[in-house]
Image (spheres, rainbow, N blue to C red):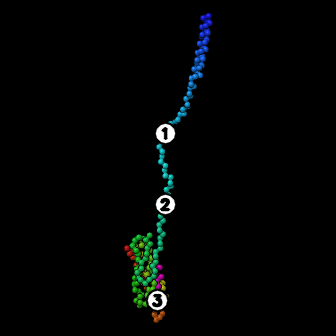
């Protein structure tokens, strides 16, 4: 009889212990799952470079030199001394002048008189190099008072010859008159001086 009660007690105890474990499992809080932690790969921030100026530099064109102006030819007048004007952009030296000095040949009778004369242009090459000099020309004054047959008698620089002859060809004279008739006068000579005036 004792064995039978012992078996019953042991069975009851086993059942009670099983119920206790089951109730304990049901009552115990559920385990909270740990959230997944994302792994971040570390990176290094380097130095930030300053932005460069991307504006394009435009090179300005070279200044164009002022155009060379022709030498001014003075208006005709009765004076025997005239001045030529040199463009200051092309020549910065002394101011050139051309002086006319009648030699007196052919003028002894005082019957021909100059009415119009032109100053020869000072050659640029000679002016830029500071060359001075003179030219002696010989010509004929015809019956109308015009100049013809111009020749160079003497010259210190051949660069003055062309401009001298060109200027003399434009001269105008009062012709010689004998007994009311105009006649030619030959071998009229004139000296043209090229001088540089200092300012």
Residue 166 belongs to magenta span: yes
Q: Disc 3 marks which residue?
A: 175
How many marks are shown on the rendered structure? 3
Q: Which residues lie in the magenta part?
A: 165-174
Say which of 2 and 161 sits in front.
2
Q: Residues within 10 Å of mark 1 (few under 14, many from 20)?
A: few
From the viewer's perspective, tell me whether residue 170 is left or right of residue 29: left
Pointer 1 or 2: first along the chain: 1
Q: Which mark is residue 60?
A: 2
From this viewpoint, is residue 156 visible?
no
> What residue appears at the point 48 percent right and 45 percent down from the top-left corner?
48
Disc 2 and disc 3 in contact, CB within 8 angstroms: no
Residue 120, x across and y down, in percent: 44, 78
Residue that label 1 marks: 44
Label 3: state its secondary structure: loop
**Residue 65's spot in the image, x, y percent?**
47, 66
Is 113 contained in the magenta span?
Answer: no
Q: Are marks 1 and 2 in contact (CB under 8 Å)?
A: no
Q: Are marks 3 and 1 in contact (CB under 8 Å)?
A: no
Q: Which residue corresponds to the image point at 49% horizontal and 56% vertical from the top-left?
A: 57
Say which of marks 2 and 3 sits in front. 2
Viewed as shown, does residue 6 lie left or right of 199? right
Is the residue marked by circle 2 packed among few (<14), some (14-19), or many (20+) residues within 10 Å? few
Can you name the residue that lies furthest to the bottom here? Answer: 179
Q: Quadrant of the N terminus?
A: top right
């Amino acid at each position: 009889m004792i064995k039978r009660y012992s078996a019953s007690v042991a069975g009851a105890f086993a059942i009670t212990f099983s119920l206790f474990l089951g109730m304990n499992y049901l009552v115990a809080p559920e385990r909270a799952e740990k959230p997944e932690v994302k792994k971040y790969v570390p990176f290094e921030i380097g130095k930030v470079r300053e932005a460069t100026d991307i504006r394009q530099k435009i090179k300005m064109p070279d200044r164009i030199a002022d155009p060379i102006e022709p030498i001014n030819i003075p208006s005709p007048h009765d004076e025997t001394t005239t001045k030529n004007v040199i463009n200051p952009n092309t020549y910065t030296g002394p101011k050139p002048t051309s002086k006319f000095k009648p030699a007196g040949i052919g003028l002894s009778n005082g019957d021909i008189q100059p009415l119009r004369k032109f100053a020869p242009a000072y050659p640029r090459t000679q002016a830029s190099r500071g060359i001075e000099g003179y030219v002696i020309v010989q010509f004929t004054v015809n019956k109308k008072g015009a100049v013809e047959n111009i020749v160079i008698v003497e010259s210190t620089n051949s660069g003055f010859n062309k401009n001298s002859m060109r200027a003399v060809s434009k001269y105008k004279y009062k012709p010689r008159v004998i007994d009311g008739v105009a006649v030619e006068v030959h071998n009229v000579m004139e000296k043209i001086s090229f001088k540089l005036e200092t300012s």
